[in-house]
Amino acid sequence: MTRPFTEEERRLHWQCRRGLKELDVIFEPYMEEHYRDAPISDQQVFQRILAEEDVDLLAWFMQYTVPDDAEYRQLIATILAKLAHTL
């Protein structure tokens, strides 16, 4: 049995609900299945990513463009690899 989300994790989970379904199907499963096991540094980058605009996020996660931030690029690749079987 998994432990319930902390207040901070609930806040982040809410931020995973975006205006675009394409992003919801990426962020919500990552938050629910992988976020807690990620290194603290990846969790911090994920929090920063969630603050970005949906149009940029969509372009990055659909691999139309790449972000300038190397930490974003690395985490996006990690998230896509972890969720490859569900996308």
Image: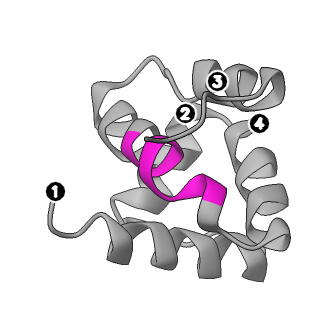
Spatial separation of the CA atoms under disc 2 and disc 3: 11 Å
Three-letter code, disc 1: Thr
Q: 35 or 73: which is nearer to us?
A: 35
Q: Which residues are magenta?
A: 29-36
Our reading of the magenta stretch's main secondary structure is helix
Q: Which residue is mark 3?
A: 15
Graded by Cα atoms within 10 Å as few (under 14), some (14 to 19) or many (20 or more), the crowding at tag 4 reads: few
Q: Earlier in the sequence, mark 1 or mark 2?
A: 2
Select label 2 or label 4 by which is in front. Answer: 4
Q: Residue at x 83, y 67 (%)?
A: 40
Select label 1 or label 2 by which is in front. Answer: 1
Residue 21 falls inside the magenta stretch: no
Q: Position of residue 22 (x, y in %)?
A: 29, 36
Considering the numbered disc 2 on the image, is that residue within a helix, a strand or a loop?
helix
Specify the label residue 51 is tagged with: 4
Three-letter code, disc 2: Asp
Three-letter code, disc 3: Gln
Q: Which residue is mark 1?
A: 86
Q: Which picture quadrant has residue 70?
A: bottom right
Specify the label residue 54 is tagged with: 2
Spatial separation of the CA atoms under disc 2 and disc 4: 9 Å
Q: Residue at x 43, y 36 (%)?
A: 28
Q: Position of residue 81 (x, y in %)?
A: 35, 77
Considering the numbered disc 4 on the image, is that residue within a helix, a strand or a loop?
loop
Q: Residue at x 57, y 46 (%)?
A: 56
Q: 28 or 55: which is nearer to us?
A: 28
Q: 21 or 59: which is nearer to us?
A: 21
